[in-house]
């Protein structure tokens, strides 16, 4: 075989330069967005929601003074965080639990009602032999809102409380030392106890069960729904176009070109839309069956199947409309919208509040984020309306309506102008 028959297309620069340039640009965008979104979450923090609960009732200290040390600790925590980075919401314990149950905060810092009383007991016990419990502050992490979010919260809580712990330790040490008889000194154990008087306990609120991938199962299920819509639309588009004779079907060494259909553009697109809905019904059910067989908890399987069907349909319908309007470039547009921009702005592996501001803006309308919120609500938050399900459902329906309107209106205009799907040489 001669070189001319092997590489005739390669001799025309545009034949290979265009794909090289297109792939290079898209992959560079992919690398910049993905790496830029994960490298420094703590540096990107902005308005990271955390509940602060101060239930301390105060008490009379051994020196006879009425005090509320819990309020003092809370003030130290507030002063120790950057309000632009941390959205510290001071609420009661019931409100905090409601926020945790709905995924509105990544965790809570809880100062109990007997905090000051325990501080007083600690100062008295420091000069008397015997064991005593330190006053406790609890950091409740919300694994269901995101594993990395819980890790960031723990770091924030530890940092803020370490500062408050040290300040309270200096205060108590000075008080106890000043009250000692002349010539007496604190023992080494007492000094160590007073230097760090607060016992900081980190514990998960409503821990996730096994089989949830440490809180990642909701993200991967949402990703599967988006891929089913995007990839399913791409496959359906190609196979239906082949069946209608608009493009050839090549299988191995075989090449087949059916007679071209005479249906108008809108009718063709409608057929693809209906096919996508059937795909959505089947694939959503298969996903749940496979997840259940693999041991993933699916507490609301019917709700998940119904939402999954809607999500796949909405993404698939929109993707088909984009390809119908733009043709081959629509494949690239869909890839960018549903995958390249969607994954880093999902808010699943990296919280939106710990991602670059660009991703926070994208998350307002990117399909991946909306699907993730709804799926997370169904899987982790008992399908509560206020835990992301209402928002995700509304945005998914809106996406479906926009996809139908975009494709339907443009196809109707194409048909009205007699822009038939024929080769340019045959166009009227």
Image (spheres, rainbow, N blue to C red):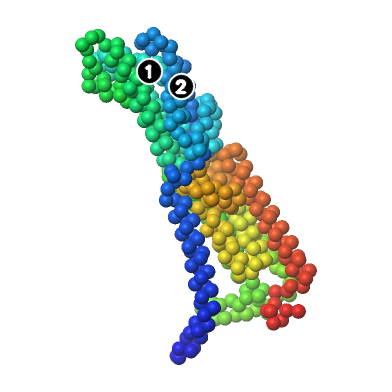
Instruction: Report whether 197 appears left or right of 384.
Output: left
Q: Using the image, determine if residue 13 lies above or below residue 223.
A: below
Camera-side residue of 117 and 180 = 180
Camera-side residue of 257 and 182 = 182
Instruction: Report whether 355 appears left or right of 281.
Output: left
Q: Judging from the image, what secondary structure is the residue with disc 1 in?
A: helix
The disc at residue 118 is 1
Dot 1 and dot 2 residues touching (CB under 8 Å): no
The quarter of the picture where residue 425 lies is bottom right
- Determine if residue 125 is in view: no
Q: Using the image, determine if residue 67 lies above or below residue 6.
A: above
Q: Using the image, determine if residue 11 lies above or below residue 25.
A: below
Q: How many marks?
A: 2
Q: Judging from the image, what secondary structure is the residue with disc 2 in?
A: helix
Among all residues in the image, which is located at the extreme right? 416
Task: For marks 1 and 2, give the CA distance.
Answer: 14 Å
Quadrant of the image containing the N terminus:
bottom left
Q: Position of residue 105 (x, y in %)?
A: 51, 36
The quarter of the picture where residue 325 lies is bottom right
The crowding category of the residue bearing disc 2, from other C-alpha atoms within 10 Å (few below 14, some 14 to 19, many at least 20), is some
**Residue at screen point 26% across, 16% down:** 130
Q: Position of residue 236 (x, y in %)?
A: 61, 66
Q: Using the image, determine if residue 120 lies above or below residue 331.
A: above
Instruction: Report whether 200 appears left or right of 223.
Output: left
**Residue at screen point 62% across, 76% down:** 247
Camera-side residue of 179 and 218 = 179
> Which residue is the site of mark 2?
71
The crowding category of the residue bearing disc 1, from other C-alpha atoms within 10 Å (few below 14, some 14 to 19, many at least 20), is many
Tell us which disc is closer to us: 1 or 2.
2
Quadrant of the image containing the C terminus:
bottom right
**Residue at screen point 59% across, 76% down:** 249
**Residue at screen point 70% across, 74% down:** 421
């Amino acid at each position: 075989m001669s070189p001319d028959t092997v590489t005739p297309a390669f001799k025309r620069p545009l034949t290979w330069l265009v794909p090289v340039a297109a792939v290079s640009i898209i992959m560079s965008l992919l690398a910049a967005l993905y790496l830029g979104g994960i490298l420094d979450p703590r540096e990107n923090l902005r308005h990271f929601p955390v509940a602060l609960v101060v239930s301390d009732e105060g008490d009379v200290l051994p020196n006879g003074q009425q005090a509320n040390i819990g309020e003092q600790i809370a003030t130290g925590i507030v002063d120790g965080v950057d309000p632009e980075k941390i959205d510290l919401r001071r609420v009661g314990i019931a409100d905090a639990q409601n926020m945790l149950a709905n995924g509105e905060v990544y965790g809570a810092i809880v100062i109990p009602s007997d905090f000051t009383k325990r501080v007083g007991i600690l100062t008295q016990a420091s000069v008397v032999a015997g064991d005593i419990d330190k006053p406790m502050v609890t950091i409740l992490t919300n694994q269901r809102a995101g594993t990395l979010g819980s890790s960031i919260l723990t770091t924030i809580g530890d940092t803020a409380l370490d500062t408050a712990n040290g300040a309270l330790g200096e205060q108590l040490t000075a008080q106890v030392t000043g009250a000692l008889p002349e010539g007496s000194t604190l023992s080494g154990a007492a000094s160590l106890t007073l230097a760090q008087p607060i016992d900081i306990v980190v514990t998960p609120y409503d821990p996730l069960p096994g089989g949830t991938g440490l809180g990642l199962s909701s993200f991967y299920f949402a990703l599967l729904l988006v891929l089913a819509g995007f990839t399913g639309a791409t496959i359906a588009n190609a196979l239906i176009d082949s069946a209608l004779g608009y493009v050839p079907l090549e299988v191995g060494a075989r090449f087949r070109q059916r007679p071209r259909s005479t249906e108008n553009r809108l009718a063709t697109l409608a057929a693809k839309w209906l096919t996508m809905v059937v795909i959505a019904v089947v694939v959503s059910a298969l996903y749940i069956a496979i997840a259940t067989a693999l041991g993933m908890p699916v507490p609301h399987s019917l709700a998940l199947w119904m939402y999954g069907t809607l999500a796949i349909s909405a993404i698939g319908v929109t993707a088909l409309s984009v390809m119908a309007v733009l043709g081959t470039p629509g494949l690239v547009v869909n890839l960018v919208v549903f995958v390249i921009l969607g994954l880093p702005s999902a808010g699943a592996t990296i919280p939106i509040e710990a991602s670059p501001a660009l991703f926070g803006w994208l998350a307002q309308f990117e399909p991946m984020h909306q699907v993730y919120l709804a799926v997370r609500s169904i899987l982790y938050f008992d399908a509560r309306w206020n835990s992301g399900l209402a928002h995700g459902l509304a945005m998914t329906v809106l996406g479906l309506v926009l996809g139908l309107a975009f494709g339907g209106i443009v196809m109707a205009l194409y048909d009205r102008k007699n822009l038939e799907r024929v080769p340019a040489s045959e166009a009227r």
